[in-house]
Amino acid sequence: MSLKYQVVPVTSFSQNCSIVWCDETMKGIVIDPGGDEKQLAMLIQELGVEVESLVLTHGHLDHVGGTEPLAAALGNKPIIGPHKEDNFWLQGLEGQSQMFGFPLTTPFEPTQWLNEGDKVTFGNVTMDVYHTPGHTPGHVVLYCEEAKLAFVGDVLFNGSIGRTDFPKGDFNTLIDSIKTKLWPLGNDVRFVPGHGPESTFGRERASNPFVADEMPLY
């Protein structure tokens, strides 16, 4: 299998930033660089990964706060995602910074928005993009079928789901995103959430109090 990854909890919020790469070519991406960009740049160098782009699952500050500085530090790499419905979050980053006591993060727009059905490629790895609104309206999930691995941002957690009390969040929409976009990918799919430990879709279907559907545990 050519996909490798390392999850790095960043900032005081301990959100998961993922460095993901193809071990055959050492080309890769960084998913949700929420901060600590100097630490991330050093680790990327140590790993020997040639980052081709920075990919965002959604527009919340704790997942995008280090994006522009890291993109610049790596040689002005393109910023991809999220879906354009999250543009209002990216344009409100200054206010989010003040609200959460983060270093000032200025608004930006990605090089490319992501849509349902798009693909993110690096080296010999292809990841499929799923638009999964609910936590935010423009949230996306990245899935590598070959590795049976998904990066789900704040849609789904080990034992929980994303908050829906933010502007344009919606509980029913989030549940629908999980059940119609994620579950069909298979119970054996592992996922890296935006916060906390990994799990599998099968385990969450069996035991997650928000979305369990009495499926047998695989």
Image (cartoon, rainbow, N blue to C red):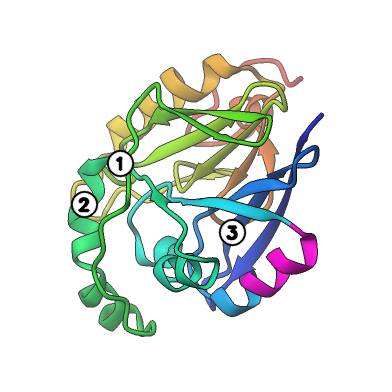
Report the residue at 66% width, 36% height from top.
Answer: 123
Q: Height in image: 109 above or below 193? A: below
Image coordinates for residue 107, horizontal then vertical, percent: 23, 68
Mark closer to the chain start, 1 or 2: 2
Q: Is residue 46 magenta?
A: yes
- Residue 95 x, y percent position in the rendering: 21, 76
Dot 1 amino acid type = Trp
Tell me if mark 3 has few (under 14), some (14-19) or many (20+) residues whose alpha carbon lies within 10 angstroms of its own: many
Amino acid at dot 2? Asn
> Residues under labels 3 and 2: Cα distance?
21 Å
Alpha carbon distance from label 1 to label 3 = 21 Å
* Residue drawn at x 50%, y 69% as measured from the top left: 70
Magenta: predominant secondary structure element? helix
Picture quadrant of residue 167 = bottom left
Quadrant of the image for the C terminus? top right
Tag 1–tag 2 contact (CB < 8 Å): yes
Instruction: Magenta stretch: give its range.
Output: 41-48
Point out which mark residue 113 bears: 1
Extreme-front residue of the structure: 75
Q: Secondary structure at mark 3?
A: strand
Q: Which residue is mark 2?
A: 87
Whether residues under marks 1 and 3 lie with C-beta atoms below 8 angstroms apart, the answer is no
Residue holding disc 3: 16
Q: Is residue 101 above or below residue 62?
A: below
Mark closest to the chain's N terminus, 3 or 2? 3
At x 44% / y 61%, what residue is drawn?
Answer: 63
Name the quadrant containing residue 200. top right
